[in-house]
Amino acid sequence: MILHISDCFAPRTGGIEIQVAALAAAQHRAGQAAEVVTATPAGPGPEMASWPYPVHRISARLPGQLPVHPRAGQAIDRLLTTRHPRVVHVHLGAASPFAWAALACARRRGIPAVATVHSMWDPVVRALYRILSRTGHGPTAPVAVTTVSRQAARLIRQALPDVTPRVIPNGIDAAWWRSPGAVAERQDGRGGSTVSPFAFHTRFAL
């Protein structure tokens, strides 16, 4: 089972939230067991019918429903004990204390992990991650690191020279957006081929 861990998830709406939801859905459609763990509280109304995969919310009552949990490590450890994931895929932004806690838990338990950096690290963030790496909680842990662009990879290497991120761009499955005529043209061999980045992530995470 693939366990995606992200500080932010729906009902919040943003780049990471959309990418995590779409990736887990693509893996589910491919017949893989995928689940999401987040520190984001649920919104009003029923939720279970909204997702084709389980969503575990480890949230605390904080002002503004902030996706922060004061005892994230303990709660994630308990979840890992019950769910037994084959791989943990953490999704990181500029500041992701919940995802970093999950990465530390997976590392301690010897669970294979992928860390995807979805954002551009500014000078302050790069300095912070240099400090984190010296404590043993940064991405120098035995983990496969990916990011979304060559520029983002360059900034990560500035902060952590020992890390070589693999670039897997965010994107869409272009075939899904084509008109039926364009799809037929491509099937006749006169159009270009497309590969879903979500399908690539599905294979890479195994």
Image: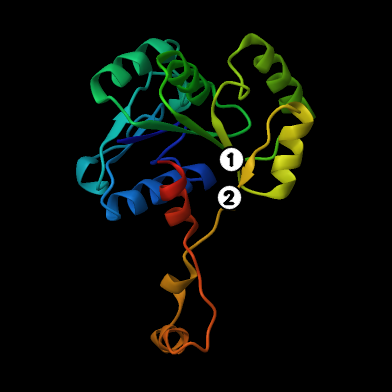
User: Is there CB contact under 8 Å for labels 2 and 1?
Assistant: yes
Count neighbours of disc 1 (C-alpha within 10 A) and say few if under 14, some if 14 to 19, many if 20 or more. many
Question: Residue at position x 46%, y 78% from top?
Answer: 178
Count neighbours of disc 2 (C-alpha within 10 A) and say few if under 14, some if 14 to 19, many if 20 or more. some
- Does 75 appear above or below 206? above
Q: Position of residue 134 (x, y in %)?
A: 68, 12
23 with respect to 145 (left or right): left
From the viewer's side, name the closer residue of 190 and 56. 190
- Does 59 appear above or below 6? above
Dividing the picture into quadrants, the one containing residue 5 is top left
Q: Position of residue 164 (x, y in %)?
A: 68, 36
Question: Residue at position x 30%, y 54% from top?
Answer: 30
Q: Quadrant of the C terminus?
A: top left
User: Which residue is label 2 attached to?
Assistant: 168
- For residue 132, say whether it is visible: yes
Q: Position of residue 20 (x, y in %)?
A: 44, 44
Count the marks: how many?
2
48 with respect to 15 (left or right): left
Which of the two labelled residues, at mark 2 and mark 1, occupies the earlier sequence position?
A: 1
* Three-letter code for the amino acid on which mark 2 is drawn: Ile
84 with respect to 99 (left or right): left
From the viewer's side, name the closer residue of 25 and 188. 188
* Three-letter code for the amino acid on which mark 1 is drawn: Thr
Question: Residue at position x 67%, y 49% from top?
Answer: 149
Q: Secondary structure at mark 2?
A: loop
Q: Quadrant of the N terminus?
A: top left
- Does 76 appear above or below 88? above
Determine the CA span between mark 2 and mark 1.
7 Å
Dividing the picture into quadrants, the one containing residue 108 is top left
User: Which colour scheme appears in the figure?
Assistant: rainbow
Q: Secondary structure at mark 1?
A: strand
User: Which residue is label 1 attached to?
Assistant: 146
